[in-house]
Amino acid sequence: MKRWLILVPILVVAAVAVWFGARRSAPPEVPFGKVKRETLVSVLATNGRTEPLDWSPVHALRAGRIAKVAVEQGQTVAAGTVLVVLGNEDAAAAVASSQARVEQAQAELAILTSGGRAAELAQIESNLQRLTAEREAAAKSLASTERLVRKQAAPAVELETAQGKLAGIDLQLSAEKKRREALVMQADVRAARAKVAEAESGLAQAKKRLDEVSVRSPRAGTVYDLPARPGAWANEGELLAKVGETSKLRVIVHVDEPDLGKIKEGLPVTITWDATSGKEWSGVVHRAPSQVVALGTRMVGEVDTLVENPGRDLPPGANINARIRAQVVEGAVTIPKSALRRVGSELGVFALKGGVLEWRKVVIGASSESLAEIREGVKEGESVALPTEMELKPALQVTPVYP
């Protein structure tokens, strides 16, 4: 019994030692991925910003303090909807004053055209006609009397009487003509009408200025930018709002310079916005960039895309995430993108051959966010090493582990 009590611990220690020795001599474990044949969708993941496809600015037509902002940002409005109201006390007073001047001028014109001086002129014309007829008769009578006096067939006193009568009629005619000239009826009417037109023009201008305090939308659409604030002073021409059609948006997508060769018109685009979880918007590439610009530390092309926004829930000015489906390769030989390594100037992978690592130079084609197409270097069904903390090198014996 004592012998067994001594032997058992010895056997346990020996077994542990054997196990540790075997473990120490086993090749290190390295994660591997399989080379597969599948459909590869090459996606360019980037970011960008949204803009309305068609929009109009709304400016203050006159200077004034903003009395009221009548709409909210994001509100859909019809053409002519009042967006902002400026202070209108002076404009309203000017309309009232101009209206009074119009009414006064119209009253003066009415007096001239419907009685008053017109009736007086008619009386003068009647008197002139009567006096003209009387003068003709008096002139004939004077001529006859002069003949009789020369023949001594009538006394000289009758001649004097006839001459006096004609002279009296001439005096009356002269007086009536002067009265008519003093009235100047047509000139007065023209002047009165001109005064009415001037007053009405002033009223129209005053009403226009009053209407300008109500800043209206020039078009139907969505108020997507509204810098106007109640109580703030607005200068003439200052931007108060932007109104645009947002059911379809223009989205400027920033694509890194090395990837610009993959961009073509019509490529599908998927847009997401961090403010809405799980929501996606679809669109297409509308126009490839014409130049490369700096964006922070990146050199990018601004790709113009058109995105459908039927619910108008993606606002203009939003910073978005974009995925451009640049290429679809059917039956592509693929590996995990993380398996690619660069040794010196060579791009390649560590392939598994008989439990040993073998360096393979590869030629890549299209790629997605997680996969790369391999055109040369490995075959379907082979295994390639994935990232690991240990240093890998050719001819290293390893124990493959598949995630």
Image (cartoon, helix red, strand yellow):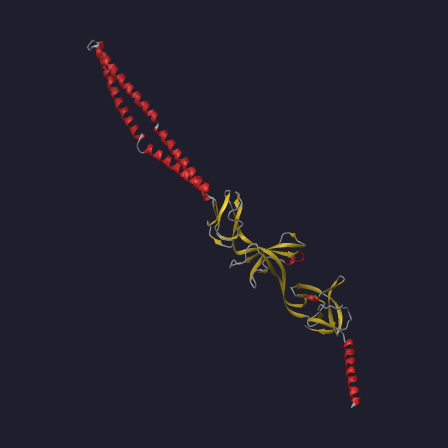
Q: Residue at x 75, y 71 (%)?
A: 357
Relative depth, front residue between 116 and 10? 10
- Residue 226 as seen in the image, left or right of residue 34: left
Q: Is residue 66 above or below residue 381?
A: above
Q: Where does the image place residue 234, in percent across and percent down from the top left?
A: 52, 44
Residue 24 in picture, x, y percent from top left: 78, 76
- Residue 189 in the image: above or below residue 352: above
Q: Residue at x 66, y 70 (%)?
A: 36
The residue shown at (36%, 36%) is 106
Find the residue positioned furthest to the bottom: 1
Outermost residue to the left: 153
Image location of residue 285, percent across then percent down: 59, 57
Determine whether, in the image, residue 389 is placed left or right of residue 148. right
Provide residue 403's location: percent of width, then percent of height: 68, 72
Nearer to the camera, 15 or 357:
15
277, 329: nearer the viewer = 277
